[in-house]
């Protein structure tokens, strides 16, 4: 043999070299060995090894190019199941080094493999369908599943379950039911997970009757599938969320009678929540006691559910007792527990107790969330304890939370009530530094404060600033100014604001605005103008109430305009506007004095006198 003559590379030698180069990640050498191998000796096993090495080194396009060669009908190394595993192990792995392969490329790969009689197995098909659905391409997932079916591939329950999950998230119940029918036709047996997915998504969209129908079909129909505790809990929770907790309770009783599927903590929590939200706190507590009797362990969710129900229905003392009992049993409260109690004590104006719980929370090593801080800020501000509010704001900022516009508005309102305008200015500046703009509530609070002090110059200045900030004054803004002018007897100024409100600003006055003006006009002896406002109310479709009529009756009594009063009494009756004790006091005194008792009797007849303004 001459010195320059090359020894042909055998398939065994090539395979050995390829394996070793692959293990050492020497991809270039790997490729050189493959290129040196006689094309007639190349087989599927060797090509699979090369594709695997290329994919692992991130050379996806080279790998796919080689795969395209395998998929040609005239090659001697067609793809097999190992090829499928190698390709999809790499392409579907998270965080791998190659470029991201899009759904269209994956779809085409599955299609090409299937056309060569090599089908992705259930595991890979399920993974691919899940990937498609998570990227919002349920239609593509649907097409892929049916493509595999039509080409003769085996489709198992797991793949159908993955597609059902995606369809459920898209609330495409038509296709969900269609897929269930197709599974039945093709002999793909649904399992408890299949029905669990269907029932879960039906319950999420409040289609509880359909969920119950699916449940009975699963249990007693052709399938005879025994529900598990997860499925029972899903259905019970769905029933409770639509106010059908009694039916949920019956389902739990069925569970208690079954030996294989007993209620667990979640079962009881769902029912307790349902009854508490319906205001049936005693029923919720009875379930809690039954839970303990059955030896089912309660958790912090159980505690929070009961506490929330009790607090929202005025049983704060009982909630505190339960909280103490559970702590004694070793159950640790969480942020939500304290948030429920702190919010309730703030609402009940028991600020000292709320602050005590807040301090206790910190001592337990729990970090209050923004809701806890905002509840406390609101509570102490409404109680006028603005020094405490400032301390809580500082702690909130130290904890890394930022106040929102609502929190700033609460603080500004509190400082206004305490006449601390320097703090209001400081808070507004702080708000600006935080990148937040005052809203209508902010401006209305400040304008109302200036109006209450008779400082009309600052009130109008604030209103101009409000408009320059792009905010349109509303009925509350105008109402504050009108009320303030009326209180100091400046009726003409009040009427000027009213005219500006209803003309240039296009803000419709409400009954409260009209009542303020009518009352002030009548007290000022301007009943004719008050009558014109009554006509204006009618034209605008604003309904006068008992307070409106009372103001008019007082004014008419002062003028002794009996005919107009009788006419207005008829109008009040026609509008079914009930008189109150003030109405009857004015009319009884006046009409009795002028001998109009028959008209008074006719007016009273058929009315049920209300103790408060209608």
Image (cartoon, rainbow, N blue to C red):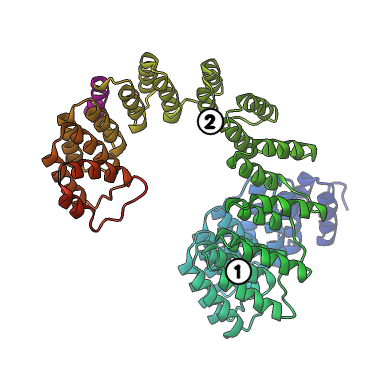
Asked if marks 1 and 2 touch (Cβ < 8 Å), the reply is no
Residue 275 locus on image (x, y percent): 59, 63
Q: Which residue is painted at 61% across and 62% down in the image?
A: 71
Classify mark 1: helix, strand or loop: helix
| For residue 415, above or below residue 24 | above
Question: Horizontal placement of 129 versus 543: left or right?
Answer: right
| For residue 446, above or below residue 273 | above
Residue 162 locus on image (x, y percent): 60, 64
Q: Which residues are magenta?
A: 492-503
Question: Horizontal placement of 14 versus 553: left or right?
Answer: right
The mark tally for this picture is: 2
Q: Which residue is painted at 26% across and 36% down in the image?
A: 551
Residue 438 locus on image (x, y percent): 46, 25
Q: Circle 2 sits on which residue?
A: 410
- Compute the Cα span from label 1 to label 2: 40 Å
Q: Circle 1 sits on which residue?
A: 236
Q: Earlier in the sequence, mark 1 or mark 2?
A: 1
Question: Horizontal placement of 604 versus 221: left or right?
Answer: left
Q: Is residue 502 magenta?
A: yes
Does any portion of residue 266 appear in the rendered image? yes
Image depth: mark 1 or mark 2 in front: 2
Q: Residues within 10 Å of mark 2 (few under 14, many from 20)?
A: many
Question: Horizontal placement of 101 versus 266: left or right?
Answer: left
Classify mark 2: helix, strand or loop: helix
Helix, strand or loop for the magenta stretch, by majority: helix
Q: Which residue is painted at 16% across and 32% down in the image?
A: 559
Residue 153 locus on image (x, y percent): 60, 73
Q: Residues within 10 Å of mark 1 (few under 14, many from 20)?
A: many
Q: Is residue 198 magenta?
A: no
Picture disc at residue 534: none
């Amino acid at each position: 043999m001459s010195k320059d003559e090359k020894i042909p590379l055998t398939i065994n030698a090539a395979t050995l070299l390829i394996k070793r180069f692959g293990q050492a990640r020497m991809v270039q050498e790997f490729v050189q060995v493959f290129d040196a191998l006689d094309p007639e000796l190349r087989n599927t096993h060797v090509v699979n090894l090369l594709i695997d090495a290329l994919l692992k080194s991130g050379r996806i396009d080279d790998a796919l190019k080689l795969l395209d060669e395998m998929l040609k009908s005239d090659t001697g190394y067609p793809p097999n199941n190992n090829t499928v595993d190698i390709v999809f192990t790499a392409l579907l792995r998270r965080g791998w080094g190659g470029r991201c392969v899009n759904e269209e490329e994956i779809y085409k790969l599955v299609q090409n493999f299937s056309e060569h009689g090599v089908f992705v197995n259930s595991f890979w098909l399920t993974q691919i369908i899940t990937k498609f659905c998570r990227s919002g391409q349920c239609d593509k997932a649907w097409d892929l599943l049916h493509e595999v079916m039509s080409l003769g591939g085996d489709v198992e329950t797991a793949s159908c379950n993955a597609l059902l999950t995606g369809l459920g998230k898209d609330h495409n119940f038509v296709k969900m039911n269609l897929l269930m029918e197709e599974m039945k036709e093709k002999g793909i047996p649904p399992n408890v997970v299949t029905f669990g997915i269907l029932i879960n998504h039906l319950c999420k969209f409040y289609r509880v009757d359909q969920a119950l129908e699916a449940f009975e079909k699963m249990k007693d129909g052709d399938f005879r599938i025994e529900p598990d505790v997860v499925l029972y809990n899903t259905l019970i929770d769905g029933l409770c969320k639509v106010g059908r907790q009694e039916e949920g309770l019956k389902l739990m009783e069925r569970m208690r009678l079954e030996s294989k599927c007993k209620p667990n903590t979640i079962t009881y929590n769902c029912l307790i929540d349902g009854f508490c939200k319906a205001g049936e706190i005693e029923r919720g507590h009875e379930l809690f006691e039954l839970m303990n009797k059955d030896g089912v362990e309660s958790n912090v969710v159980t505690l929070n559910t009961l506490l929330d129900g009790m607090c929202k229905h005025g049983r704060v003392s009982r909630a505190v007792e339960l909280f103490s009992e559970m702590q004694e049993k070793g159950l640790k409260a969480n942020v939500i527990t304290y948030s429920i109690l702190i919010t309730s004590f703030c609402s009940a104006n028991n600020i000292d107790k709320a602050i005590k719980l807040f301090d206790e929370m910190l001592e337990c090593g729990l970090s209050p969330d923004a809701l806890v801080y905002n509840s406390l800020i609101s509570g102490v501000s409404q109680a006028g304890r603005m020094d405490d509010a400032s301390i809580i704001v500082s702690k909130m900022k130290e904890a890394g939370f930022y106040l929102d516009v609502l929190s700033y508005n609460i603080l500004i309102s509190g400082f206004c009530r305490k006449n601390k305008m320097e703090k209001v200015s400081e808070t507004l500046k702080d708000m600006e530094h935080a990148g937040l703009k005052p809203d209508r509530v902010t401006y209305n609070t400040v304008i109302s404060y200036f109006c209450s002090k008779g400082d009309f110059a600052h009130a109008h200045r604030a209103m101009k600033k409000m408009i320059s900030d792009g905010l349109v004054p509303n009925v509350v803004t105008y109402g504050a100014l009108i009320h303030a002018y009326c209180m100091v007897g400046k009726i003409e100024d009040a009427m000027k604001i009213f005219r500006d409100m209803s003309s240039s600003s296009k803000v419709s006055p409400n009954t409260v605005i009209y009542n303020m003006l009518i009352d002030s006009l009548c007290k000022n002896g301007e009943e004719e103008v008050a009558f014109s406002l009554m006509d204006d109310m009618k034209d605008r479709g604003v309904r006068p109430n008992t307070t409106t009529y009372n103001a008019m009756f007082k004014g008419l009594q002062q003028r002794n305009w009996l005919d107009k009063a009788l006419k207005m009494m008829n109008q009040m009756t026609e509008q079914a506007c009930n008189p109150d004790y003030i109405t009857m006091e004015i009319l009884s005194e006046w009409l009795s004095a002028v001998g109009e008792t028959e008209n008074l009797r006719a007016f009273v007849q058929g009315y049920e006198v209300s103790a408060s303004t209608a």
